[in-house]
Amino acid sequence: MRVAVIAVYSVKGGVGKTTIAANLAWCSAAISCRKTLLWDLDAAGGAAFLYGLGPGKGRSAQTAFAREGEPERLVRATGYPRLDLLPADESLRRLDAVLTEIGKRKRLARLTAGLARRYERIVLDCPPVLNEISAQVLRAADCVVVPLPPSPLSARALTLVTEEVRSHGRSDTAVVPVLSMLDTRRALHRTARAEHPDWPAVPLASAVEQCAARQQPLGAFAPASPAQRGFGQIWTAVERRLARSGG
């Protein structure tokens, strides 16, 4: 089976992107039993924090993208079977400039293809940007998960991402919209849910906040929670879309 790259991407910050990426990687490894890499491309380094890992010591995260870069050297074990993590650090604040300087439009795609020797699934936690980083992500991705908090601006955010996928992605790149931080006590959120009943949804829940407090994926400490069911629904949607394209 070929490697599949799943990008969790939004043009807007604060939408639950990192939490979704971290929990989808756990679903891939624990539920689908696939050898999985969670690759954090956001300089904030939230993915590593959610797994109780600090920034890597020695080589900076940016060096993975150098002409002779070897991302395998930066990979760290998470403590969960079949799940590794490639952490971010402050050096990624210059990643857009680095990618522009080296002039390799498919650098990330080639790096993920090289990692296929070790992994079946690579989950990318992406920064909320529209630049060379996002273009490289979309060239590499087989599936793009788009977290969308229920609001009138969500449709515009999804349109922007879809247009970016059309511009930079492949013709078979799948887009999976997700309602994040859904609070059905609010009329606006209920309306959004009614308008998109087939989209996976993650509820606004204290259990999700506990991921950061415990520094664990939700499935590790609250496997029966509604929020974990939401993450599981997202992962099922991703795997179905990948299966349609032969992934």
Image (cartoon, rainbow, N blue to C red):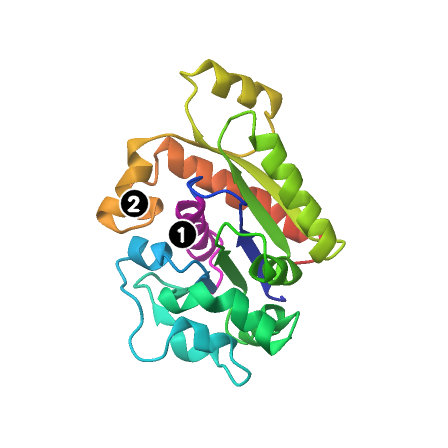
- Neighbour class for label 1 at 10 Å: few (<14), some, many (≥20)? many
Q: Which one is in front, 203 or 29?
A: 203
Measured along the vertical axis of the image, is residue 117 above or below residue 168?
Answer: below
Discs 1, 2 touching: Cβ within 8 Å = yes
Q: Secondary structure at mark 1?
A: helix
- The residue at 49%/61% (across/down) is 34
Q: Secondary structure at mark 2?
A: helix
Residue 19 is one of the magenta-drawn residues: yes
Where residue 70 appears, as percent x and y from the top left, is 48, 81
Mark 1 and mark 2: Cα distance apart in space: 9 Å
Where residue 3 appears, as percent x and y from the top left, is 59, 65
Residue 23 is one of the magenta-drawn residues: yes
Q: Which residues are magenta?
A: 17-35
Q: Main secondary structure of the magenta part?
A: helix
Q: Quadrant of residue 155?
A: top right
Measured along the vertical axis of the image, is residue 14 above or below residue 106?
Answer: above
Quarter of the image that includes the C terminus: bottom right
Q: Amino acid at mark 1?
A: Ala
Q: Which one is in front, 91 or 215?
A: 91
Q: Is residue 28 left or right of residue 196?
A: left
Measured along the vertical axis of the image, is residue 72 above or below residue 27?
Answer: below
Where residue 83 appears, as percent x and y from the top left, is 40, 63
Q: Quadrant of residue 73?
A: bottom left
The tag earlier along the polypeptide, 1 or 2, is 1
Q: Amino acid at mark 2?
A: Cys
Q: Residue furthest top?
A: 187
- The residue at 33%/31% (across/down) is 205
Residue pointed to by mark 2: 211
Q: Residue furthest bottom?
A: 68
Quarter of the image that includes the N terminus: bottom right
Residue pointed to by mark 1: 22
Q: Is residue 116 visible?
A: no
